[in-house]
Image (cartoon, rainbow, N blue to C red):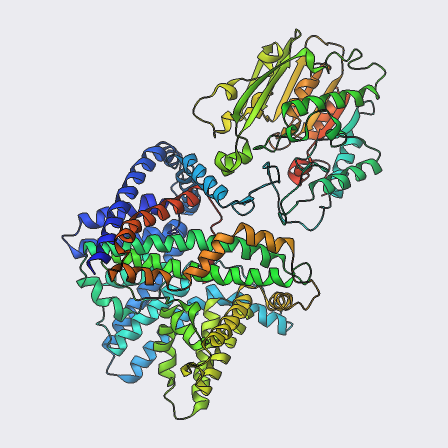
Amino acid sequence: MLFSSVIFLFYFLPLVLGLYYILRFSITAKNMLLLVASLFFYAWGEPWFVLIMLASICFNYIFALLVDKFRERRNAAYTIITLMLIVNLGMLFVFKYMAFALRIVNENTSFGLNIPNIALPLGISFFTFHGISYVIDVYRGHGAVQKNLFYVALYISFFPQLVAGPILRYNTIADQMVNRKESWDKFALGCCRFIVGLGKKVLLSNSMAIVADHIFSMGGTSDIPASLAWLGAIAYTLQIYFDFSGYSDMAIGLALMFGFKFEENFRYPYISRSITEFWRRWHISLGTWFKEYVYFPLGGSRVTNKDKMIRNLLIVWGLTGVWHGAEWTFVVWGLINFAFIALEKISNFDKGTRFNPLRHLYAMFIVVIGWVIFRSPDLIQAGNYLGNMFGLYGNGFWSETTWMFLKEYALFFILGILFCMPIATRMNKLMVDGARFSKPLELVYPVTIIVLFLVCVSYLVKGTYNPFIYFNF
Amino acid sequence: MHNFFAKKRITAFLFILVLVTFSVLNIIQSFGPIQKTLASADFHYSEAKELIHELDDDINEHVFDKFGFVEAYGYMQSLMWKNEENNFEVVKDMEGKLHYTYFATGPTDTKDLSDRVAALGAHLDPKTKLTYVMTPDKYVRGYTQFPEGIPYNYNNETADGFLANLKQDGIDTVDLREGLLESGIPAKDLFFTTDHHWKIKTAFWGFGQLVNHLDGMYDKPLDPDHYFTDLNNYNVVPYQDIFIGSQGRKAGKYFAGDDDFDLIYPKFKTDYSFYFKTGETEATLNGRFEDALLTTYPLNVQGATYDLTADKYFTYLYGNQGIVHVVNKDKPNGLKVLFIKDSLAVPMISFLSTVVSEIYLIDPRYYTGDIMDFASKTDLDHVFVSISPQDLVDEFFPYGSKD
């Protein structure tokens, strides 16, 4: 089930919210409701794959019990953690990477292995990382082991973050599952956050997707002038941001409605002045996960030798790339991020404060180039597209199609670029600080948000283009 | 900080109000269809995905005031001065008429399709003649213009290639795109604004062109006195601002506007038998042209502007049926013809019924039998294939394939 669907908005959400607040006398009853609702939410789109998620929940529950029991016996605990990683990552490998791996084998050998057509269970990368986080946090003592399978199931399957994150670490939510308090203010914040996220997804991301998908699908080395290629790249840059951050906003908003507090996942990454800063602001929960469970255990940046730091960065960014999808484009994209972050670290570029507009231009240039590679179906097409952006194939600069897309989607480009910047945050601050126009703005706000919601509904009811970017994940 | 929460609280209150109201209205609206789906559902786990899909469809199709939202959507698109809506589902030309289009770099190769028509011709009884009738595309060459950059689908060029192949195979063709701008009908009135079909007067003109063409093929002219092809011998009943066609239904009337509709039927005495069968549904009607070949339901339907049953174009011959048999009882010794057709040809064929003896119509999308078999085993003088340029795709040519 998608948040941006009629069934979620007008059937699932009101029903679950209504029942939840009817059951507010008992935390156990509320949690049970959320678990049942979450399983239903997942099963609605993937009735078979819910069994895989349930299996993941069960074996991570058992691994956590075992690691807790054998915590004092170092070798046994390591063995359990290793087994846990093999099982979790093995499952991820089978569903997500096996076809890719077999393809590489076939391309480099004469084995001619049969490549099975295995469908990717929705959100498998997310619930696998949740499972790993749970067992490791228990081992590290960052959260008490759950004797009750039910709570592990709730942590892994909680519907706001189930399909597309944010990736919650167990230690950030363990206490909230049993000791959270709902309030009208939390609920109100959650509603507003959810609607804003819905608007980002339905209006901005989906509109940009139309432009990006058409231009990227033109492919090849002919008929794409530089302006059109850049327009497609910028449209995709906006699409992916509003899709991810919109989904995160919806997830955070929904969690707040149920009394949970999730951490921020996006902090205006496109205002960054370095790639390092970009990754501090982009998909924060994924970055934090890799930092906590991969980078720091490898030694992080506090190593005596810079070579080791570079090695650690290389491992993390290689994995980050691969986590996003089983294709060389994701590997290359991860390595590009690694290269620039490593260079910035070595040169202390990130700490500089001079030439900020140029730094911003540099960061956005690398980010946009990175998204082109990320978006392309393979490296050859990525190369062709980049070639078109820099006029390598003699297709000229301007075309009627560029003008048409700009004209047809002018409003969405303008709003997209504006809302990449912290304008909404500043306006909120203006109202809170009691500035001259705060009163009228205060009245305008509820009307604006509700109209935004109704506009989104009209787009959904109309059945407008609504691509689901998370199928790869 | 108080201000911050105050506005959020008001918003949340309004949100709940909207959410609950729409939820209740939606549940009421879709309760029947959901109940029906569940009643006929197969509850095996292996069928779960299919059932979920059907329930999703029920819910999405039966949203409360669905077309109110579509109207709102269309209004927003028009406020943005957009010429395309919803990922180029429909686009506007410079005149505001809606079109189906897609991004294409050139015409589509239709050699396989023309070969199928040739195979049909070879399969017919030698006495049966075959003609391909190419009805016009809404993009009228020499008239229609798209705003800068709006993609053009090369339908006309695809149709040109298709007709060239047919001619090479020695198949008789009538290209109703030719002479369209000299028809006497103002170019802006050739097609509906909100629908992909030609207007009924244009279809009537097409009927005249077809009769002219046939008169050159048969010793005995079909309309020697030009009586049946004279519009003055027909009643023309105009209905103002009544029609929102298939393209308009996608974008809403605030984006697309609406159309007038002319109902044309003979002033002279007529006597018909009309039989149709689509799936398990079949019926026979008898009487005058307007009683047997027309249904006025779409013209009289109230409060369901966007419903498919309100589609005015389906006034003629009850729209698209799997197979139709029309008998003109006043012309017992005329031609017996078969049309393998898409929807565009329907009104033209109904007018043609005034000058021939019998007409069979087959819509390849809904006819489950073997078309070649039917054409060769039925006593026919003439077989027409009439698939418009936009429908030159496999679905409309399910016969004569080499595979």
- Rendered image quadrant of residue B370: top right
Figure disc tally: 0
Residue found 61% across the figure and 68% down from its top: A386
Q: Outermost residue, top direction? A: B269
Question: Can you give x and y, in whole percent of width and height, for residue A345 in the image?
Answer: 44, 84
**Residue B123 falls in image quadrant:** top right
Quarter of the image where one finds residue B163 = top right
The percent coordinates of residue B305 (x first, y second) are: 47, 27
Coordinates of residue B309 in the picture (x, y in percent) = 50, 26
Kindly tell me whether residue A54 is visible in this rendering.
no
B132 is higher (above) or lower (below) than A104? above
Which residue reaches farthest front?
A436
User: Quick one: B358 or A403, which is closer to the camera?
Assistant: A403
Could you tell me residue A431's position as x and y percent? Answer: 27, 58
- Asked whether the viewer can see residue A396, the reply is yes
Residue drawn at (47%, 46%) of the image: A464
Quarter in which the C terminus of chain B is drawn: top right
Q: In which quarter of the image is the N terminus of chain B?
A: bottom left
With B364 as the anchor, is B115 left or right in this view?
right
In the shown orientation, is residue B175 left or right of residue A119? Answer: right
Please tell me whether residue A327 is drawn above or below residue B183 in the rendered image: below
Extreme residue in the bottom direction: A304
Question: Looking at the image, which is closer to me, A425 or A169?
Answer: A425
Front in this rendered view, residue A202 or B47: A202
